[in-house]
Image (tube, grey):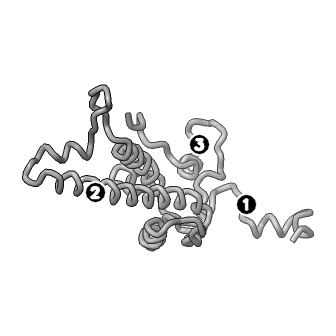
C-alpha cells in the first residue's frame, strides 16, 4: 500500500505561509548537501562497480547524490551486482535444461522446479533468491527516485539553503555576541 493523504509540505513553505498549524517547526528539514559522487567502497564486485559509475553519473546530473549517500548507493549497487551474478547463473541453468530436451517447451520447468526424493515438486533455491533480490532492489531504487512512482517524491539538491524570514543567516550570527570569538 502506498503513502496515504497529500504529500506533506516542507517546513520552509509552512513558515513562509505563517505556520498555519501553529505547531513547532523543524527548520533543519530540507538540508541540501553538496552534489558529489562518493568514491565506491573497495569491496564492491565488478557488476556493482559498473552500476556505481553508471548510476552515479546520472544521479549527479540530476542533483540527487551526495557524499552522505555512500552507504545507500553501495547497498543498492551491491544488491544489483549480486542479482546480476544470480541471473547469469540461472540463465546458464536454464540453457542446460533446454539443451537436455531440445524442442520440449516443458523442459524449461526443470530450471525452476525439481522433484524431491519423496516426489514433491519444489522451487529451486536460486530462483527464490533472485525473486528476493529483485524485491530488495526495488526498495533500494526508491531511495534515489529510480522508478517512476518514486521520482515524484524526490527533491534534487540545489546546495542552496533558503533565507527564511525571521531566521538569522550564518554571517549575522557570527557578527554578534560571543560567537564572533568562536571562529
Give the position of the C terminus as an image quadrant.
Answer: bottom right
Image coordinates for residue 164, horizontal then vertical, percent:
63, 58
Q: Secondary structure at mark 1?
A: loop
Q: Residue at coordinates 63% horizontally, 36% vertically from top-left?
A: 23
Please give the label number shown on residue 58: none
Image coordinates for residue 166, horizontal then vertical, percent:
69, 55
Q: Is residue 172 above or below residue 82?
A: below
Residue at the farthest left position? 103
Label 3 vs label 2, nearer the camera: 2
Q: Is residue 62 above or below residue 4?
A: below
Instruction: Give the CA distance from mark 3 to mark 2.
Output: 57 Å
Q: Indicate left or right for 156 with 18 as reference.
A: left
Q: Residue at coordinates 61% horizontally, 67% vertically from top-left?
A: 67
Q: Residue at coordinates 61% horizontally, 51% vertically from top-left?
A: 29
Q: Which residue is mark 3?
A: 19
Q: Earlier in the sequence, mark 1 or mark 3?
A: 3
Image coordinates for residue 127, horizontal then vertical, percent:
34, 45
Q: Earlier in the sequence, mark 1 or mark 2?
A: 2
Q: Secondary structure at mark 3?
A: loop
Q: Is residue 167 visible?
A: yes
Q: Indicate left or right for 82 with 74 as reference.
A: left
Give the position of the N terminus as an image quadrant.
Answer: top left
Dot 1 crowding, Cα within 10 Å, few <14, some 14–19, many 20+: few
Considering depth in this image, is 2 or 70 the residue closer to the camera? Answer: 70
Q: Earlier in the sequence, mark 3 or mark 2?
A: 3
Label 1 vs label 2, nearer the camera: 2
Q: Which residue is mark 2?
A: 91
Q: Which residue is mark 1?
A: 168
Amino acid at each position: 500500500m502506498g503513502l496515504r493523504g497529500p504529500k506533506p509540505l516542507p517546513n520552509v513553505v509552512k513558515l513562509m505561509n505563517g505556520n498555519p498549524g501553529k505547531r513547532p517547526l523543524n527548520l533543519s528539514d530540507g538540508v541540501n548537501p553538496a552534489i558529489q559522487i562518493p568514491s565506491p567502497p573497495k569491496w564492491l564486485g565488478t557488476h556493482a562497480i559498473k552500476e556505481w559509475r553508471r548510476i552515479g553519473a546520472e544521479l549527479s546530473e540530476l542533483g540527487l547524490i551526495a557524499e552522505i549517500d555512500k552507504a545507500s548507493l553501495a547497498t543498492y549497487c551491491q544488491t544489483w551486482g549480486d542479482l546480476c551474478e544470480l541471473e547469469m547463473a540461472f540463465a546458464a541453468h536454464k540453457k542446460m535444461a533446454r539443451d537436455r530436451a531440445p524442442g520440449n517447451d516443458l523442459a524449461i520447468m526443470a530450471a525452476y522446479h525439481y522433484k524431491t526424493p519423496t516426489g514433491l515438486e519444489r522451487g529451486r533455491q536460486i530462483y527464490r533468491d533472485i525473486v528476493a533480490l529483485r524485491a530488495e532492489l526495488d526498495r533500494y531504487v526508491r531511495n534515489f527516485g529510480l522508478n517512476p512512482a518514486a521520482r515524484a517524491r524526490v527533491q534534487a539538491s540545489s546546495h542552496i539553503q533558503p533565507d527564511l524570514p525571521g531566521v538569522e543567516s550564518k554571517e549575522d550570527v557570527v557578527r554578534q555576541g560571543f560567537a564572533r570569538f568562536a571562529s
